[in-house]
Image (spheres, helix red, strand yellow):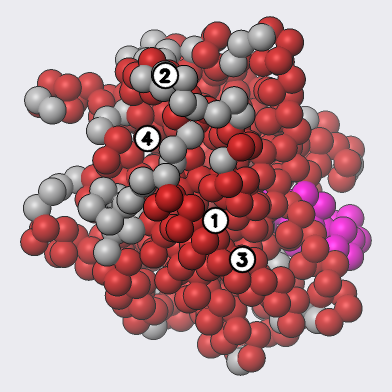
Amino acid sequence: MNTENLQTKWGQFIPLAIVFFFWGFVAASNDILIPVFKTAFNLSQGESQLVSLAFYIAYTVGSLIYMGISYLIKEDLVNKIGYKNGLSLGLAISALGTLLFYPAANTGSFPLMLSGLFIVALGFSLQQTVANPLAIALGPIATGSQRLTMAGGINNLGTTIGPLIVSFAIFGSNTGGTSIMSIESVKIPYLVLGLAFLLVAILLKFSSLPDKPALVVEAENNEGGIAKKSALQYPQLVMGMIAIFLYVGVEVSTASNLPAYMESKLGFLTQDVAPYISLYWASLMIGRWTGAVEAFTNDMSLQKILRFIAPYLAFGVFLAVNAIAKHDLTPFYIYGLVILVLIAADIASKGNPARMLLIFSVLGIIALLIGMTTSGMVSVYAFTSVGLFCSTLWPCIFTLAVSGLGKNTSQGSSFLIMMIMGGGVISWLQGFVSESIGIQSSYIIGVLCFAYLAFYAWKVSGILKTQGISFDKKLSGGH
């Protein structure tokens, strides 16, 4: 690819990157809203997880609406209106959702708050359906997984910053016990976010992003008569749908139940949990920056060096953001040692998404078991390290699930996006279970999720081999 084409591809990737940032900002901010709403509206732990449920169930509803409209017009909706217009429409829908935060905050209405989050995520559903395959298609297919990894790293820049900004908006800069919680203060950051959605929608309209990438057109033209009629006829996709459901579930529930654990077992104040929520989501950024190094260079020696530089550069971003927020950084330096486990696992995966999924799922199980059986800050670091081991799973599962689908790839993508609802269902399930067996023991739900992901990694390798698909020399790494 010549320099001019490379610059064009990066120019097209930038507006996509902003959209990925938005998803992370809002999703991680929910983890601050959960304990705030729990206190303000006098909710149980299970009821507080309705925040996650309302947000993530919208992805399923959005996908069903998308498929329904496509059926009625007898053509794929995004193929009809174009990828660029699809993203802009999704952003406009999300902007409408943020407007509900104003009356919800003024009237102190929990259902209206949930409705606002639901509509924001409804827009995200359409955005995700378009943006994930588009990120893969903007360049050589061999490095598509790395571009998705890179986009995920930008997503987690949003997840790192989001909790801190929302926490500051609600509690101010005071991290002591005299901070006063105000539901009305929630509306300002979300109204600003809505304005940002609209600005980026306008930016997309004038960007060089294609309405249909060339690789998508080629995939449609080269299928011949061998493709199956439905994406659901491919076992790698059906099993992958369950995998996405459980992956998003364990990723979200680990973080969304962490405040309740730290408050009830370790005596933390709600406003003092934000840096640790930020660390959890920064852990995903750390892992994704590590997994994206091959998108920058084909030099193997340089890749080895970057595998050590990238994670600590991402960790430095986390420390810098928290330093600006005037949080004490002393408790976090030890986490630098945990990152070495991530680097070793990334090297051991040898770029194979199935092997990476297996290794990181096993490490996720180990991290949760340590968190469940220890106490104090050791348990907190164990739970936050789950973010490191979730970091690569999205693109691994996504890549494995849509491999070999051909012209059914966009349909398969829509089915996968639908399963993001796992973030809400699993979070609610863990919150509900915690009321019976305790918040710390409730992380057994996450262990079971990781167990299936390890099984899928083993099973899908055999399925794809029978279809003549191998990744040993092709791909390398995560979401």
Q: Secondary structure at mark 2?
A: loop
Residue 173: give x, y in percent of width and height.
57, 59
Q: Are marks 3 and 2 in contact (CB under 8 Å)?
A: no
Instruction: Identify the mark at residue 224; answer none if there is no mark.
Output: 2
Residue 90: give x, y in percent of width and height.
60, 23
Residue 217: give x, y in percent of width and height.
38, 16
Residue 428: give x, y in percent of width and height.
79, 59
Q: Earlier in the sequence, mark 4 or mark 2?
A: 4
Q: Secondary structure at mark 1?
A: helix
| Three-letter code, disc 2 | Gly
Magenta region, main secondary structure: helix
Residue at label 3? 452
Q: Establish if 348 lies above or below 187.
A: below
Q: Nearer the observer, disc 3 or disc 4?
A: 3
Residue in front for this viewpoint, 40 or 171: 40
| Three-letter code, disc 1 | Leu
Residue 356 in view: yes
Instruction: Identify the mark at residue 136; answer none if there is no mark.
Output: 4
Would you say 15 lies left or right of 98 here?
left
Q: Secondary structure at mark 4?
A: helix
Quadrant of the rendering where the N terminus is positioned: top left
Question: Rounded to the nearest whole Å, what is the CA distance between mark 4 and mark 2?
Answer: 22 Å
Residue in front for this viewpoint, 55 or 176: 55
**Residue at (60, 84) in percent of width and height:** 369
Q: Earlier in the sequence, mark 2 or mark 1?
A: 1
Q: Nearer the observer, disc 2 or disc 1?
A: 2
Q: Which residues are magenta?
A: 30-53
Q: Earlier in the sequence, mark 4 or mark 1?
A: 4
Q: Quadrant of residue 453?
A: bottom right
Q: Are marks 4 and 2 in contact (CB under 8 Å)?
A: no
